[in-house]
Every structure is written in C-alpha cells, then in structure tokens.
C-alpha cells in the first residue's frame, strides 16, 4: 500500500494530506446536512436505501488509501481494475475471514489484525476475478467480480459488511442475469432483503426477463453452503446465490436454489 507524507518543517504546520483529509470530512458532513434537508423538504423516495458511509469509516479508508466512491458497474470495474493493475491489492490467500471480519493473516493466527485495503482474488491466468474494498475488517463501498474473459460478472455495494443498493450480475455475453435493490437489512429467513427484482434467462435460445418484485437474496459458498447472513459469508468464496420472491397467495417462494443453474446463452 502506497502512502504519501508531507515533509514540511515545524510542529505547528499541518500536512497537505491531513488538510485534504479534514476538508474531505467537512465536505462529507456538509453533504450529509444537505441530504437531511432534501429528505425533509423534498419528495421522498422510499426505494432508495441509505448507503452513505459514516465519516469515521471514510477517514479510515482515506488514511489507508482506499477509495470508497461508488459509481456505475462499469465505472467501479474500471477503477478497481486499475487498482489491481497498480499492484496495491492484497491477495485473498493472505486474508482470513472469522466472525464476520476480514483479517490480515499471519503465521501466528493470534496476531492477526483487522484488514483495511483492497482484497483481490484472481483467475488461473492471474487476471482479477474479484476486487473489494474493506475497512476495519468489513466490506465498505463497491466490489466487482469478473469472468476470465475480463467482462463484468457481478457488481455490488456494501455498507458495514452488508449488501446495500444495486446488485447486478451479467451473463458472459453481457446480458443481464440479475438486478436487485438491497435494502441493507437482513431478511428474517436469511440473506438480504431485496426489491425491484429482475432475472434474465434464455429459453429455447431466446432471451427473456422475469420481473419478480421483492424477495431475498442469499449468497452461498461451495455448492450451497450458507451462514444465513450475507455479511458473515466471505465474499471471496462466494460461488452463487439463492433467490426467493414474495407472492400474494403463497408467501415467499424459491425462484432458484442455485444461480449457476439459470439457463445461460449457448455458443
């Protein structure tokens, strides 16, 4: 991880980096104030979860050189891929996950410390398969997964370890496979509560989409292992997801127990 230190003389002079950091925190506080005003004075959008990260987390991230800004899937992918190419990520093999926290592994596990930085997982050809932002041991901000072809597989946003905001996944050819809006709350039945559910699939070679309304999304590792909560499931070990949707007559119904079985394009 690269750090930049000012070399000004004198004890009373604040460093340029510190000034930038304090200015940034001030901007965050101002933005939060504006957000409160707009919430009170303007129209409310019940479908937009509060994904704003606390100033303390932003400061910790800035001090560690982690950028938590969240954009479109393509913007996040481009930025996190650049971070990977710069060589400032930490391989997943050096990260342990215990009790819902990402820890920097040491030979002596008792000396492990909470991890802050960019976690990266790679394909066999050493290209990135996942890059995620972690602060004080918890997922914060965007994470992006790629196919070995370099195209985006999945893009998510996180707050304090929880999935929040848009979750989007694509087939290898770029067609939408899943879009959902996570509320940031755990579902009583496990996984994350989600709304605005859309699932894409292929039937007889034709692409179609199902609009499912609301439900829950549960990430799994291995061939279906879950912890019941997505924030206690290590992201770098996730292989797929289970999806459930709400119905008027029969309550919550399983849509798929394994996202890998959703029909993909052939050829």
Image: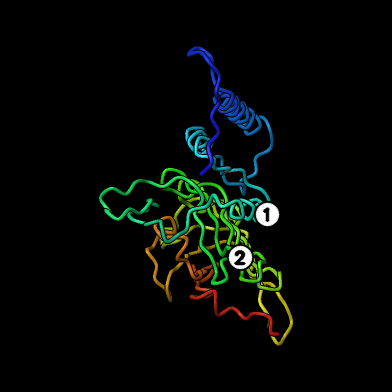
Residue 27 seen: yes
**Residue most extreme to the right:** 206
Residue position marked by numbered label 1 in the rendering: 78
Label 2 packing within 10 angstroms: few (<14), some (14-19), many (20+): many
- Residue at disc 2, secondary structure: strand
Residue position marked by numbered label 2 in the rendering: 146
Q: Quadrant of residue 174?
A: bottom right
Q: Quadrant of residue 234?
A: bottom left
Q: For the residues labelled 2 and 1, say whether their Cβ atoms are less than 8 Å apart.
A: no
Residue 190 is situated, as x and y percent measured from the top left of the image, at 42, 62
Residue 236 is left or right of residue 104, and the answer is right
From the viewer's side, name the closer residue of 231 and 89: 89
Residue 137 is left or right of residue 20, and the answer is left
Specify the quadrant that holds the C terminus: bottom right
Q: Examine the rendered structure and indicate whether residue 86 appears above or below residue 266.
A: above
- Residue at disc 1, secondary structure: helix
Residue 23 is situated, as x and y percent measured from the top left of the image, at 60, 24
Q: Residue at x 60, y 26 (%)?
A: 20
């Amino acid at each position: 991880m690269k750090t930049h230190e000012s070399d000004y003389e004198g004890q009373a002079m604040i460093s340029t980096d510190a000034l930038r950091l304090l200015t940034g925190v001030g901007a965050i506080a101002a933005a939060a104030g504006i957000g409160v005003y707009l919430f009170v004075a303007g129209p409310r959008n019940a479908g937009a979860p509060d994904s704003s990260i606390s100033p303390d987390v932003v400061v910790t991230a800035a001090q560690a050189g982690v950028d938590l800004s969240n954009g479109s899937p393509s913007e996040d992918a481009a930025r996190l891929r650049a971070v990977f190419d710069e060589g400032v990520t930490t391989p997943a093999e050096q990260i342990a996950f215990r009790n819902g926290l990402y820890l920097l592994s040491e030979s002596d596990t008792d000396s492990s410390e909470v991890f802050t930085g960019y976690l990266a997982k790679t394909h066999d050809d050493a290209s990135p398969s996942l890059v995620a932002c972690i602060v004080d041991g918890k997922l914060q901000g965007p994470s992006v997964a790629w196919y070995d072809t370099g195209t985006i597989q999945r893009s998510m946003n996180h707050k304090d370890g929880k999935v929040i905001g848009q979750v989007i996944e694509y087939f290898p050819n770029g067609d939408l496979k899943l879009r959902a809006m996570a509320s940031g709350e755990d579902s009583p039945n496990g996984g994350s509560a989600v709304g605005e559910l859309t699932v894409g699939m292929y039937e007889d070679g034709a692409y179609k989409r199902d609009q499912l309304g609301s439900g829950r999304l549960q990430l799994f590792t291995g061939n279906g292992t879950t912890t019941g909560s997505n924030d206690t499931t290590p992201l770098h070990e996730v292989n797929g997801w289970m999806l459930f949707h709400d119905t008027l007559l029969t309550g919550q119904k399983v849509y798929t127990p394994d996202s890998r079985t959703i029909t993909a394009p052939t050829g």
